[in-house]
Image (tube, rainbow, N blue to C red):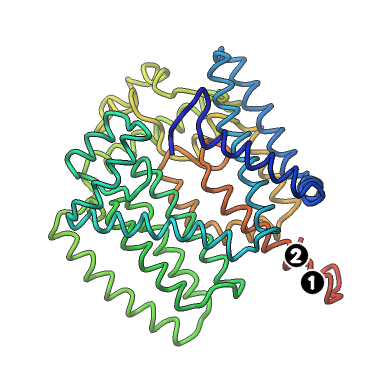
Amino acid sequence: IKLTVVIPVRTVGLFVFTGLLFMIHNRQFVGSLNRHRQVYMVFGVMALLGGSLAFVHGEEFYSLAESLLRNTIQPVLIFLTVYLAIEIFGIRFVANTFLLFAVISSVAAIFQFVGFDPAWDVRRVLGSIQGDPPDIKHILRTGSRPMGLVFTPILFSYHLVCGYVIANILYRQGLMNPLLYAIFTVIALFGATANGTRSLVLAILVSECLQLAVRGQLKSYVLLAVGAVLAAGGFYYLETVGSRVVSADDSSAVGRFVLLKFGLQLVLDNPLGYGWGVKPGEYAWLFWEELSHLPKASSVFRLGIHNAFVNFLLQYGIFGFSIIAMLAVLHLRKAMAIAGAFLAYFINAMFHNAGVFVGELYFWYAFAVFVYTYDLRYAVTLANGQPRAQQMA
């Protein structure tokens, strides 16, 4: 929800919930802070880096405060409160709560796609409460792009992909019934298709296909073959109804190439980074001679880069990249586990502006679920007395 009272309502709610947890479960609260102090240290270092670079580039105080809230304070509160909630209420309850809302929103998007007006009416009511911007009001008025019950179509994709990541984590840890996981994955795919976000459909399909292929079992290959046939039929149907999922020549798809090229040129022009709040469009005129001949070149003046990884480099530069790379090397097994668990998320983020440390919030809910299951496996390994070399780093 995007309601604001000086700061977003969700932030006020996070502060209140965090305060209640501190008062009621003080010992667990402090224990969680100590246990994950490295995570909070990384947040602090990234905040110092992003804020300092922004200050050097003349970013205003209000913009810095807004970025601090979006990129650091809210993610920290989400990670902390979700992890504590898991310890208090159990992982199934906390994870399934997120999945329930993802399913409800996905089903709403499916109904919106088939033209079921009450599904649009519910979203319009929510929009009247939270105050939709003009472009979203236009979508709701014309019914041009289903978004479930979420604020924007892109936020819908992040909500759904994080739901898929959480479901996948639960399934791989034996905490979700295989049938329920299959049902959720199908609903997620249908919801993503209804929403029209190609990157989300691609992310889920690639993740599922890789998992089946890695197993190397006959059953897995049969499922892949059946899935390929069903996917071919689905894509044929989507082509007949003119879905943007199977279109590669619309303005959104064509414009991404020039945006990516522009973003990479900005990174090469200043590898140290521009800091929080960087607005790529303000630099577009410097590269216009090189970009003007490309299709949809004018999009560089009004749109973001639409690649979370390039946006990370723009904001934090080579120092930010070096920090993440160093952490990945020092904690290689954990880094590989994160890459595997969040593969679908990272694929989706390759085509959108928000991402890890660049303003995306759903990730930190899923990350708290991942860290809890990882900690749990590590504790079980210790309890079983396995040699340290066999433990997860």
Q: Is residue 267 visible?
A: yes
Depicted 17 relative to depicted 8: above or below: below
Which label number is shown at residue 90? none
Q: Is residue 243 left or right of residue 165?
A: left
Quadrant of the snapshot with the C terminus = bottom right
Q: Is residue 290 visible?
A: no
Q: Residues within 10 Å of mark 2 (few under 14, many from 20)?
A: some
How many numbered discs? 2
Label 2: state its secondary structure. Answer: loop
Which residue is depicted at the point 53% across and 26% down?
Answer: 7
Q: Residues within 10 Å of mark 1 (few under 14, many from 20)?
A: some
Which residue is depicted at the point 85% across and 68% down?
Answer: 388
Q: Which residue position is annotated with label 1?
A: 381
Which label number is shown at residue 392? 2
Label 1: state its secondary structure. Answer: helix
Question: Is mark 2 in CB contact (under 8 Å) with mark 1?
Answer: yes
Which residue type does callout 2 highlight? Met
x and y percent of residue 291 in the render?
32, 26
Viewer-side residue, 111 vs 187: 111
Viewer-side residue, 39 vs 69: 69
Quadrant of the snapshot with the N terminus = top left
Q: Earlier in the sequence, mark 2 or mark 1?
A: 1
Q: Is residue 233 left or right of residue 157?
A: left
Which quadrant holds residue 332? bottom right
- Which numbered disc, 2 or 1, marks the residue closer to the eye? 1
Depicted 221 relative to depicted 131: above or below: below
